[in-house]
Image (tube, rainbow, N blue to C red):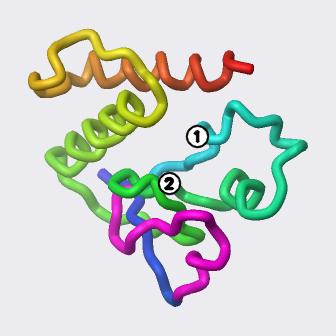
Amino acid sequence: MKLLRTIQLDASDSFVFEKPAESDEWAVSGAFALGRSDPANLQGKARTAFRAGFLGLSSLGRSTLAQIVEASEADRRAAVEMLAAQLVTHFGAPISQSPAAPLTRKSTLQCRSAAIRRVYSSP
């Protein structure tokens, strides 16, 4: 399977984004993280992050570039769990089990879906 990893060829992301991602983080499209804002009203670094920034899962920083890399099932699980944990911690997604328990695929998908609904439905 293939997943995205952030890459940095130079220091430009530190000028382009409020918070640059670290190199070699698992990444996803991060537009959902700005979902509470009207895209038409985004300006500057926030607009660039919405339009062209990959979201690093460890740091929640942005990267202009990401590479598609081979990943194992364990890598996928780790990336999904990291994303779910970030959604709970930073975006207010609910979690349906003890925080100490490992996240299951079902609870991870529930967390992600709830967070995305919350981001897009909030004023």
Helix, strand or loop at mark 2: strand
Q: Which residue is identified by label 1?
A: 33
The magenta stretch spans residue 24: yes
Say which residue appears at 43% left-offset and 36% top-offset: 90
State the extent of the magenta-drawn residues as a range: 11-26
Q: In which quarter of the image is residue 51?
A: bottom right
Helix, strand or loop status at disc 1: helix
- Main SS category, magenta section: loop
Residue occupying the far top of the picture: 96
Q: Mark 2 points at which residue?
A: 55
Can residue 23 be seen by looking at this rendering? Answer: yes
Residue depicted at 72% across the width and 63% down the height: 45
> In which quadrant of the rendered image does the C terminus lie?
top right
Where is residue 58, by image quadrant? bottom left
**Dot 1 amino acid type:** Ala
Tell how many labels: 2
